[in-house]
Image (cartoon, rainbow, N blue to C red):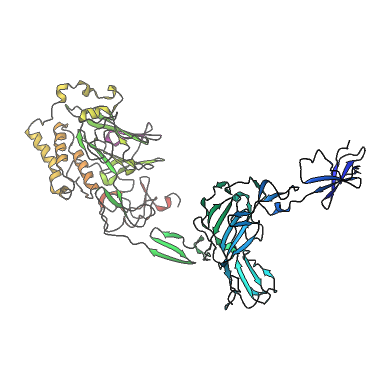
Amino acid sequence: MMSPLWALRCLLGTALLLVPAHGSTPTFNFPKGRLQKCTNEGEIVQLSFIKTNPCITCRCRDGLVICDHERCDMTKTCHLLLLGQRIRPDSCCEQCKGCTTPDGAHKEGDEWPEPSDPCRVNHCFSGVITQSTVKCHTPCANPLPPAPGECCPRCPSCLLSGQVIAPGEQLTPRSDPCMTCQCDRNGTQSCSKRVCPALSCPASKTVRDQGQCCPRCKGTRRIKPSDGCVMGKRRFSAGQNFTLDPCTQCSCQGSTSVCARQSCPELACPLVHQVYSPDRCCPVCRRPERVRRVCRYAGQTYQDGSTFKLNSCTKCVCNDGQIDCELERCDRNMTCPPGHHAAKLTGQCCEQCVEDDAVCTVFGDPHYNTFDGKIYNYQGTCKYVLAKDCADRSFSVRVNNDARKSRFFSWTRSVSIKAGGLRISLRQKGRVKVNGRFEELPFVEMDHAIIYQDPTDNFNVVLKLVAIGVRVTWDGDSFLQVKVPPSYKNKMCGLCGNYNGVRSDDFTTKRGKRVRSARRFGRSWRIGGRSQCSADSRRKSRKNRKRQPSCKDRASRANAVRQCNRLKSPLFAGCHAKVHPASYFKSCVQDMCECDHKRSCYCEAMTAYAHDCQRKGVFVDWLEGTDCAVHRRCPTGARYVACRSPCQPSCAVPEPPAELCSADVQCQPGCVCPEGTLLHRGVCVPPMLCPNR
């Protein structure tokens, strides 16, 4: 019985069988042992561990076991092998598929021209016949015609890129491995560009060796002999036509794919600058990028073609290292559509048309004018939601109404504003409470809000919620105005309506139901229960609620009409065409008829009308000769004047914008600081006392 095999020592395809020496230990070095002897000369020796490899045959020769290994060299160049098909009956090597069509059979690697056209070439590679047209390259000015049976013209000398080619030699330029130039023995040169053959393997199994023109298939693939063609991961039936890529149209002929591949023209650019696109067959030269210079200004670097601004009105562009600037021209005759006004936005040079802020006004008994312009009366004497951000809940305004000894009507007694962590209460006679603490006017500044008395508006108390752009104006009696920016459109709710641009649906209750009655609408926004209602209101009978106010006598009514006629007088004539005074006049007379004789109840209607006129661009100085003017309280050191320019310097803005100081801006009554001083926190101070100076 034979000893276990330790190793085969191979010499030129022949191996001597070695068995391990007694007591030897396996190592990774060349094994030590003795030759295996045999007695039957010429007999095939069966070895259990290699009997499954048909390429190894061991025989007894000269008393020793000699093993021969058959080499299958075609596996190095052939990708498709026919499973079970041997090159000879006694061989272990499988046949390479080659290319077989009804026109004949060709071996792997065969190349042959068309008999009728030497420029048409066929190539059998990876079991696929590729048909292509030779693309000639002529590196000389006056080429000779092609030789008989040849495709390409010839150059009279064998010179390529300054290099001489010896007769009978071929040269491939480094710039294009697909180009081959051959110098014939007669000293002429012809060059052609190769078309890469179609491959039967998947794209993931291809590799392009360095310096080679075309990719090849990696490894081998065994297929069963049958009709049909294998291309990549797909199988096609005999006679089926298919497209392999934008350059290649194929047909399956028997078991061989025959592909006609388009030949691409020679490009003047190097191979590394040639780019392909998915929908095109041939590459194109990548357009060289132009080297452009950058621009530098004020320590900043700008790339070529980039734009930047020197200021809000000067726009510049970097043009190949040169900075070109132009000044933006503004349309001074610009007109805006209704509901919009011209405004200069931050960072912009020219004014643009922007949507007006929405305003809700409450005055008198009270009368309500919603954000969308619906006017109605509601005499509830409880606590109500006037205006609220019902979408994001960023703020809310509540009013507390009081009967004030009236038989039928109520008046706004106080206003409560909630925004973030702020709780602000605006009370009678201009008193202000912030987070439970009374504050002294004329100026209060907080993190996200400021409260001040506006000397240009009869010293009304103004609250600005700076972060969200909401403004509340309160006259300390019963006039109230809430102004919100367009960003709150379709977000509001409460007695001021929903601010959606539609008046007809302003009577939407807290539960989202539309009603017609102002009383039902108002009661739906009541908060705090009956305890928040005034005692006079609780004592009113249902009968009295339906009564209409009337003046006590003719003299009282005559006085009411006389006072309210100011709205129709020439004093407001400039506004009549833009805001009709009829509804304000009617409200004014109603307020006067129900008013305590000690109060000037026409003031709220006139204040509301004057504000409405001002929003339409008409300013009316109407306080002269009335009892409505508030004592003119100015900041310390300031004095009140009837005509003051809006261009007033302060520590915050020592030099006001030019547009405020223009002669075209209309003056307004208000307080001014003495020359050489600046306004800071309600006091006129020398510039040296301003912060950060």
Q: Which residue lies furthest to the left in this view?
A: 554
- Residue 444 sits above or below residue 269 on the image: above
| Residue 213 image position (x, y, % from top left) | 63, 61
| Residue 135 image position (x, y, % from top left) | 57, 67
Residue sitting nearer the eye, 63 or 514: 63
Residue sitting nearer the eye, 353 or 588: 353
Query: Can residue 231 be seen by looking at this rendering?
Result: no
Q: Residue furthest right?
A: 22
Q: Quadrant of the N terminus?
A: top right
Query: Can residue 634 be seen by looking at this rendering?
Result: yes
- In the image: residue 269, left or right of residue 588: right
- In the image: residue 4, left or right of residue 168: right
Q: Is 431 within the magenta?
A: yes
Residue 545 falls in image quadrant: top left
| Residue 76 image position (x, y, % from top left) | 70, 53
Q: Is 450 within the magenta?
A: no
Residue sitting nearer the eye, 398 or 175: 175
Over which residues does the magenta segment extend?
420-444
Q: Which residue is drawn at 22% across and 30% down?
A: 515
| Residue 194 image position (x, y, % from top left) | 60, 64
- In the image: residue 27, left or right of residue 184: right
- Residue 404 sits above or below residue 83 on the image: above
Q: Residue at x 43, y 66 (%)?
A: 324
What is the count of numbered marks? 0
